Image: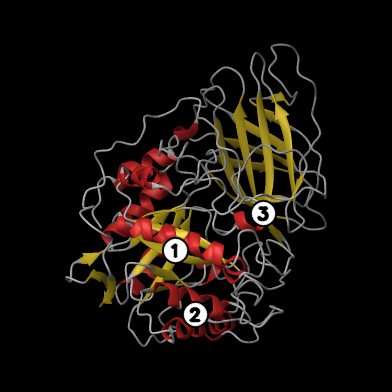
Amino acid sequence: MKKRIALATATVVGLITAGGTAVATATATAAASGCSVGYTISSQWPGGFQGAVTLTNLGSPLTYWTLAFDFPNANQKVTQGWSATWTQSGAHVTAANLSWNAAVPTNGSVSIGFVGAWSGANPVPTSFSVNGVACTGGVSSGTPSPSASATASASASASASASASASASPSPSASSSGGGGYNGPAPALHVAGNHLVTAAGATYRLLGVDRSSGEYACVQGKGMWDSGPVDQASVDAMKAWNIHALRIPLNEECWLGLNGTPSGATYQQAVEDYVKLLVSNGINPILDLHWTYGAYTGPGTACSDAHATCQKPMPDAQYAPTFWSQVATAFKGNNAVVFDLFNEPYPDAPASYVPADSWTCWRDGGTCTGISYQVAGMQSLINAVRSTGATNVVMAGGIQWSNDLSHWLQYEPTDSSGNLIASWHSYNFNGCSNTSCWDSQVAPVAAQVPVDTGEIGQNSCAHDYTDSVMAWADSHGVGYQAWTWDPWGCSGGSVLIQDWSGTPTVTYGQGVQAHLLTQTP
């Protein structure tokens, strides 16, 4: 996901992202109603940007909505949008509901997004309207004021977590009738042809979710798991969803004891204890190197900090091989544990999207175009794992934030154990986000090696896109993990649960839960 600070979006005034882009919030009301509107620039590059708008209804239930705003710069344009019907005339932009998100209950939210173009400057809009009524900042049946201004403060910083929020219409808790097949520990896995198989030779897919926090909490003063439980009850909640794989993002510097609290031995022990609990409950852990060291401020940057405080375009040669050598040493002999070598490579952005440069950097590392630090390629990370004697399955994600597998087979690293699989991420705002692209880019890889979709999701609380990804993956023998098992509230999309007992969010979590309950690994 092109985030990539694992944001749980909330309505925030004056937020500036680590990359310097503005996040503005304004409020809007219609007569006898009210709402708030949050406008976010989630990423920006020369000539283009990605934006999101979240509408929260504070008044009577809406049965339809049309959001409108004006770009301050005549050179700002919406070039592609989702979750609404987008139109633009001059600087005036409107976004009208689709059939599936027309109804917004009181205190309910709907999120929509777009890709835009700009030149000269990319300021945030300063006024919004909903159903023709301008922003006023509260619930009112009187005449609204013309506008409310959006402000920005350079001192604010993005956080990777948010408080859990209750849905206006809570859904029932996950049924305990799911979770078939938990008759013992999670199976040891290895590669056979283009499938993962158990020691008994049974074909197996990694089906489950991601749980964010291990990558950010230790460097943001939030402890080990950001106050989330890692006990038997929390695992039972996952089992009630029929979750058989849990992808766990990790922080390189916290593991190595270079930064963060906890770090070093304390951090490592917490990870090892959680892995042991999951395996004993029949859930395969996927350990993912998510945030790494290395100063990078080029296209797609999420922070300017050299420390492991955000997603970098590639892992660093200074620490990443040591990280994997230590992780492999800790878990070798336990082949129920899978290693995801690096979350979302994007060497293509600093390399100006030149395929040969991007994929060579991805595999071989070293000095890469546009990246100031020495890069650890996928080959060196595999070598670090295998040098310990570990034969665990390893995952290597493609470029463009793991969404592009177009040259994966051509640049496939060598693996002495033969236990390498391709990792793919799929969100509705990615470049490869339809069945035609999946058939042309992903299916040829899945025909030769196992493919696991380490992250799936969408930037709304619906589940239409994830439904299509899961259905396609099911038909091609591909595994998947949905982002994310954290109770952050679903206003920004891709949040599965309302609470740690596993109550699914409406409707994204409900859709993923319902699908997982129909599957066997």
Residue 423 located left or right of residue 163: left
Q: Quadrant of residue 370?
A: bottom right
Q: Which mark is residue 131?
A: none
Pointer 2: what residue?
325
- Farthest top residue? 142
Q: Please determine whether, in this image, residue 142 is positioned above or below residue 76.
A: above
Report the colour scheme.
secondary structure
Residue type (three-letter) at the residue carrying disc 1: Glu
Residue 271 located left or right of residue 305: left
Question: Judging from the image, what secondary structure is the residue with disc 1 in?
Answer: helix
Q: Which mark is residue 272?
A: 1
- Residue 291 pos. (x, y %): 59, 65
Pointer 3: what residue?
220
Disc 2/disc 1 C-alpha distance (Å): 15 Å
Q: Quadrant of residue 272?
A: bottom left
Q: Quadrant of the N terminus?
A: bottom right
Q: Quadrant of residue 175?
A: top left
- Residue 265 pos. (x, y %): 55, 67
Q: Quadrant of the C terminus?
A: bottom left
Q: Nearer the viewer, residue 64 or 482?
A: 482
At a point 33% along the width and 84% down the height, the residue shown is 417
Residue type (three-letter) at the residue carrying disc 2: Ser
